[in-house]
Amino acid sequence: MHTATLPGGTWSLGDLSVSRFGFGAMQLAGPWVVGPPADRDGALVVLREAVELGITHIDTSDAYGPRFTNELIREALHPYPESLHIVTKVGAARDAQGGWPTARQPDQLRAQVEENLAVLGLDTLDLVNLRIGNAEGPVAGSIAESFQALVAMQAEGLIRHLGVSNATVDQVVEAMAIAPIVCVQNMYNLAFRQDDDLIDMLLGNDVAYVPFFPLGGFSPLQSEALVAVAFRLNATPMAVALAWLLQRSPNILLIPGTSSVAHLRENLLGAGLSLSAADVAELDTIGR
């Protein structure tokens, strides 16, 4: 399948053209994103199938596993097709309890960038997102020192493009004042829409918005409208939620993850649903 036939078409991350429907590799690691997958061969097959289907945007991090997800990506796909772009994150480490302690000092960030390069088998990382905040969400505060450390590595040629993840609006604005960014990766879905204004602002600046956990955060009451629309369209709630995100704004890129080829194909087909104005109006009541 060619990228032009994927739901949503393509978007430009700076000079990189990527499919708006991407693949999030986090679920390829073991339970709680720790250790290797239970089915290593299956994980390799999913990665190869994603590229075969035309996906040109894979999201990962050296903290997934740690290392295991990046190792799988390299084993499955290296040498990488010229059209494939791998996006990674730095700014968090892993502890023995499976936690995500912050690691945003300049020396820590350099070590993470070098680790990503080595494990993925690359000389330059296409896009590095600075992960801010913590597992509970964004945390206010200046990111200047950390972001400037990445800008310095960009000047060295280790990084091609920059972005931020789990960031407040103020932190996005601060990063943009220091150096160009090409994406923001935050929590966002039908029920959790605190970034509506940010998405619109980024669209005006040709910056992508990449929501993670696209179906998370629903209670049974909140999801009644979603279930109703899905039933009417003979689709799954996940399919409707993904389709809504693609229709919400042209700068939204999807990175749903799965360790199943069948689920990957289901997500891809579902994201191609065409939602009517009435469907969208009903779904919009969830986040109001």
Image: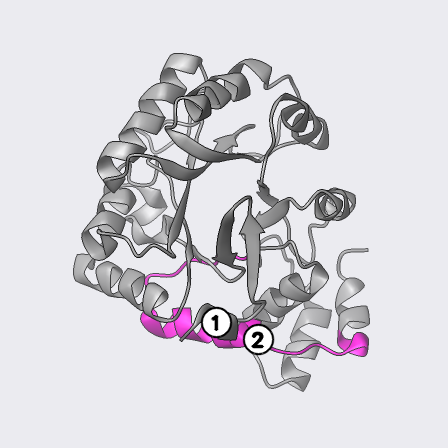
Where is residue 6 drawn, in percent x and y? 50, 71
What's drawn in magenta, residue-wise? 254-279
Q: Nearer the viewer, residue 93 or 250?
A: 250
Q: What's the residue type where badge 2 is placed?
A: Gly
Per the model, the C-alpha gap separating discs 2 and 1 is 7 Å
Q: What's the residue type where badge 1 is placed?
A: Leu
**Quadrant holding the C terminus:** bottom right
Q: Nearer the viewer, residue 160 or 274?
A: 160
Q: Residues within 10 Å of mark 2 (few under 14, many from 20)?
A: many
Report the residue at 53% width, 21% height from top: 147
For residue 148, above or below residue 158? above
**Quadrant holding the N terminus:** bottom left
- Whether residue 173 is in magenta: the answer is no
For residue 257, above or below residue 132? below
- The reply to whether the C-beta atoms of the residues labelled 2 and 1 are less than 8 Å apart is yes
> In the displayed structure, does residue 129 sit left or right of residue 191?
left
Q: Quadrant of residue 89?
A: top left
Q: Which residue is mark 1?
A: 268
- Whether residue 270 is in magenta: the answer is yes
Q: Quadrant of residue 112?
A: top left
Where is residue 282 drawn, in percent x and y? 79, 71
Where is residue 151 drawn, in percent x and y? 50, 22
Q: Which residue is mark 2?
A: 272
SS at circle 1: helix
> In the displayed structure, does residue 125 sit left or right of residue 4?
left
Report the residue at 37% width, 28% height from top: 158
SS at circle 2: loop
